[in-house]
């Protein structure tokens, strides 16, 4: 997944103008996104306003996202 998505530590808009971060994590998917971001030490409101996460936080977020998807 890391190779396919690429890495961006700060919020960006994906090809469908969805606020996204890290390795393609959708920040607009509601409470689930807020909870997951909080678990890695981030703040969803900060990220939605253009904030950033560390690469370590992004890796943890991706691991959680993949476990949730399974």
Image (spheres, rainbow, N blue to C red):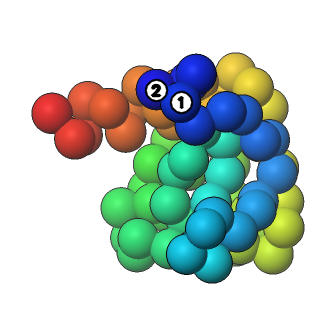
Residue at left offset 67%, top offset 33%: 6
SS for dot 2: loop
For disc 1, the marked residue is 4
Residue at left offset 77%, top offset 41%: 8
Nearer to us in this view, 8 or 4:
4
Q: Position of residue 61 (x, y in %)?
A: 51, 35
State the mark number for residue 1. 2
Q: Position of residue 18 (x, y in %)?
A: 58, 74
Crowd band around label 2 with a 10 angstrom C-alpha radius: few (<14), some (14–19), many (20+): few
Left of 20 or right of it: where is 46? right
Which of the 4 image quadrants contains residue 33? bottom left
Which of the 4 image quadrants contains residue 70? top left
For the residues labelled 1 and 2, the Cα–Cα distance comes to: 5 Å
Residue at left offset 66%, top offset 51%: 21
SS for dot 1: helix
Which of the 4 image quadrants contains residue 65? top left
Q: Position of residue 22 (x, y in %)?
A: 66, 41
**Is residue 44 something one can see in this rendering?**
no
Above or below, comparing residue 38 to residue 23 in the picture: below
Q: Are marks 1 and 2 in contact (CB under 8 Å)?
A: yes
């Amino acid at each position: 997944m890391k190779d396919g998505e690429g890495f961006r530590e700060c919020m960006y808009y994906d090809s469908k103008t969805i606020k996204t971060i890290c390795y393609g994590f959708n920040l607009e998917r509601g409470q689930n996104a807020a909870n997951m971001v909080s678990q890695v030490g981030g703040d969803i409101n900060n990220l939605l306003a253009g904030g950033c996460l560390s690469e370590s936080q992004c890796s943890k977020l991706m691991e959680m996202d993949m476990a949730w998807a399974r």
